[in-house]
Image (cartoon, rainbow, N blue to C red):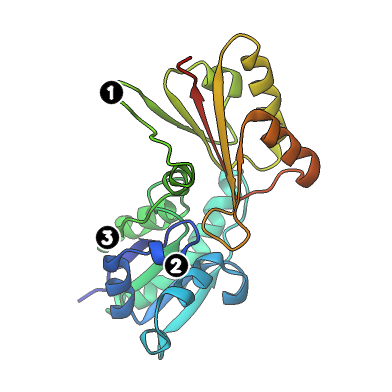
Amino acid sequence: MTGTLYGIGVGPGNPDLITMEARKVISLCNLILVPGKSPAESRAYHILHEALQQEDLAGKRVLCCDFPMTRDPHTRALAVREIYERIRGFLLDGTSVACLTIGDPLIYSTFAYLQEAAAHDQLPVKIINGIPSFLASAACFNLPLCLGEEELHILNGDSDFAEGLRLSGTKVFMKLGRRLPELVSALKTYKGTHSLSVYAVKDCGLPTEECFAGLHALEALCEDHGHPYMMTIIVKDALT
């Protein structure tokens, strides 16, 4: 019998947001795959460590996988293949592997590449959903993302910001990195002809969490802190 590769979302940062199903599956897996160079540097592992009792983690093997932050498909494919080969033998020997991801494994997650490799080998894969950062960020403001016929659009750092802002409904921007100042510039241009509301959360769910309401607050953040990576921005066209 082969082991199962689990893609487990551990939420954005608050350990209380890990689902009961995630806790149960992790407790049953003897091998945990965490993103990062070491457990100490892994945000996902920190969340897990805070959420589970020490006895639940005792005896489990932890492997670290340093996914490169690159848009080059060749470099990414080589890294994924190397990481997958590290766990492939365990899966074939019947050991189930819990692969931790920040947020949800189906939203901008590198787990999808491991899932593809496992599927190629006809190995079982199961997704354990987690709470994504944009939902937790909206909750910080008690902000409904969709009402009535309102649409929801999720965009990333490769998006055309001017085009994205013209989409109807609510726009969520994730994984902006160094392009955050470009989004702020696009928002300032867009605001010249539209009424909008801007909400941003940095380090959602962590002790360092900060919330910013309004374009001016987001602009000040860029001036003071540059471009923090763990940032979720929600833009809504104002009704009035």
Residue that label 3 marks: 126
Instruction: Please determine whether, in this image, residue 83 is positioned above or below residue 185.
Output: below
Mark closest to the chain's N terminus, 1 or 2: 2
Q: Residues within 10 Å of mark 3 (few under 14, many from 20)?
A: few
How far apart in space, not on screen, are marks 1 and 2 (Cα)? 32 Å
How far apart in space, not on screen, are marks 3 and 1 (Cα)? 33 Å
Mark closest to the chain's N terminus, 3 or 1: 3
Mark closest to the chain's N terminus, 3 or 2: 2
Discs 1, 2 touching: Cβ within 8 Å:
no
Instruction: Please determine whether, in this image, residue 197 is positioned above or below residue 59.
Output: above
Discs 3, 1 touching: Cβ within 8 Å:
no
Quarter where residue 191 is shown: top right
Residue placed most toward the observer, 174 or 13: 13
Residue placed most toward the observer, 25 or 90: 25
Q: Nearer the viewer, mark 3 or mark 2?
A: 2
Image coordinates for residue 235, horizontal then vertical, percent: 52, 28
Left or right, residue 134 beside residue 218: left
Amino acid under disc 3: Lys
Residue that label 1 marks: 148
Tag 2 secondary structure = helix
Q: Which mark is residue 46?
A: none
Residue that label 2 marks: 15
Quadrant where the N terminus is found in the figure: bottom left
Q: Nearer the viewer, mark 3 or mark 1?
A: 1
How far apart in space, not on screen, are marks 3 and 2 (Cα)? 21 Å
Amino acid under disc 2: Pro
Residue occupying image coordinates x 46% and y 43%: 134
